Amino acid sequence: MHLAVWSGPRNLSTALMYSFAARGDVAVWDEPFYSSYLTRTGLPHPMRDSIMAAGEPDAGKVIERLIGPVPWGKAHFYQKHMAQHMLPDIPRDWIMGLTNVFLIRHPARVVASFAKKREHPSFDELGFRQQADLFDLLVAGGKRPIVVDAADIKADPEAALGALCDRIGLAFSDRMLRWPAGGHPDDGVWAPVWYGQVHQSTGFEAEDRSLPPVEGLLADHVAQAMPFYETLYAAR
């Protein structure tokens, strides 16, 4: 199985990647298009030069690997994608041949968390619009993309992951509920900046039910994101 998991930043995406990697039969690739994204946009992300140097800047070559053989002798290939990395000129036809999952999270949680690392993000850095565009593309192509909300995983990891595995045709393993602290060998080079909290974790942790406060530009981003989030939430 080639499993493309589409999220935005701060969506529980790294923890979910660790969960699938912990099975033992799944190869993972952390944000395949990040180098290409920074090369094309010039955005001043933390560790920008290191990320561009470590990754593949040619989106076409990235796609060839994504649809190619499963690496490292594993049975399945988990691809952790940031939807905002899919810039308009990157082809999308290859996505139709993959099993696609959309990982969503309430915009207030995403925005508040992302702003701790990048103080004044643009709306398009958050991935909500691009997630919805990819979802619509798949639906228009006759596909039934799967949507899972990060809050559901945190509330009951075994039930949520069991349902997800059932939908994608993969047997659930309770190994998905725990992983070693300290990160994963296939983390991107940006892990020291972005993955501090998940590196301390060994499993999914319960979430505070109250939403974090946001104001100013961040509140505007949340308001703009809500229709995209609600559309995908209705399909979860």
Image: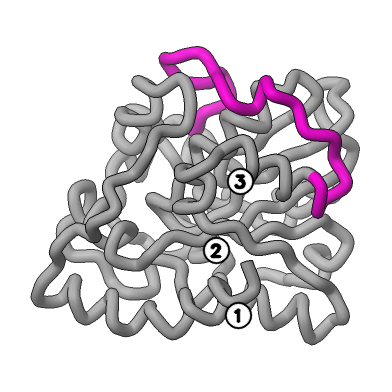
Q: Is residue 233 left or right of residue 160?
A: left
Kind of residue at disc 3: Lys
Residue 218 position within the rendered picture, expressed as x and y whole percent measured from the top left: 19, 71
Tell me the CA gap for discs 3 and 2. Answer: 10 Å
The kind of secondary structure element at disc 1 is: helix
Q: Pointer 2 and pointer 1: residues touching (CB < 8 Å)?
A: yes
The residue that appears at 33% across and 28% down in the rendered structure is: 192
Reading the image, the residue beneath label 3 is 80
Q: Give the vertical position of 90 relative to 207 (above or below).
A: below
Residue visible at 30% across and 58% down? 109
Task: Measure how far apart labels 2 and 1 are at the Cα level.
Answer: 9 Å
Amino acid type shown at disc 2: Ala
Q: Badge 3: how crowded within 10 Å, few (<14), some, or many (20+)?
A: many
Residue 174: percent from left, percent from top: 69, 24
The stretch in magenta equals 166-188
In the rendered image, which residue does mark 2 sit on?
83
Q: Which labelled disc corresponds to residue 133? A: 1
The picture quadrant where one finds residue 43 is bottom left
Residue at 84% x, 74% y is 143
Considering only vertical position in the picture, is 174 above or below 110?
A: above
Mark 2 lies on a secondary structure that is: helix
- Alpha carbons under labels 1 and 3: distance apart: 17 Å
Evaluate whether residue 228 shows in this view.
yes
Left or right: residue 212 versus residue 224 is left
